[in-house]
Amino acid sequence: MKELKSINIKGKQYVEVNERLRYFRQNYKDWSLESEVIQKTENSVTIKASIKDDKGRVRANGLAEEIKGSTFINKTSYVENCETSAWGRALANLGIGIDVSVASFDEVANAINQQKSKPKKKPRLSEERFEEALLLISENKYTHEELRSKFELTEEQLKSITLC
């Protein structure tokens, strides 16, 4: 097999889906790569990709799921991103472009990002500061949403702001 162009991700070589696809198109001319939406909800999509040989027999499958808004690209293109991931997995299952793993670029990138980013804890508001915030809300200088997004509130504080 011709060596495919790869990129280095955290010390491991990864062959991007476009390289796998190009290789497939050049070397499996009578074969097909088909996509099928297995499930689509308001917030996610699951796609299955199948590779069929020249006689229509399934030779490899790939399954992927993407969550709408889970990454920057998934804010607008989660369906397309999911299809590309499913293609990459099917091509890898056929043996194209895998030396180390079958994971898609997005799976690798997401895993790296999750390791790097630990959720920051929101600060708690003292009762005195909470009273000041309520005053600012009543003067339309601050909103309930801003307060909830910036601070961890107690159940009692949450009840108080819903009464404002």
Image (cartoon, rainbow, N blue to C red):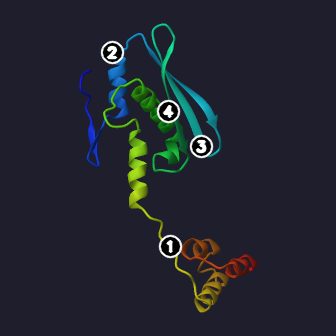
Q: Is residue 67 above or below residue 129?
A: above
Q: Which circle's residue, 4 or 3, is located before the other in the chain?
A: 3
Q: Which residue is mark 2?
A: 27
Q: What residue is at 41 percent from the left and 10 percent from the top?
A: 30
Q: Nearer the viewer, mark 3 or mark 1?
A: 1
Q: Which residue is mark 4?
A: 83
Q: CA distance from mark 2 to mark 4?
A: 21 Å
Q: Amino acid at mark 3?
A: Ser
Question: Where residue 57 sits: x, y (%)?
Answer: 51, 12
Q: Which circle's residue, 2 or 4, is located before the other in the chain?
A: 2
Q: Which residue is mark 3?
A: 44
Q: Amino acid at mark 4?
A: Glu
Give the position of the N terminus as an image quadrant: top left
Q: What residue is at 58 percent from the left and 39 percent from the top?
A: 45
Residue reaching furthest to the bottom: 128
Question: Where residue 84 sits: x, y (%)?
Answer: 45, 33
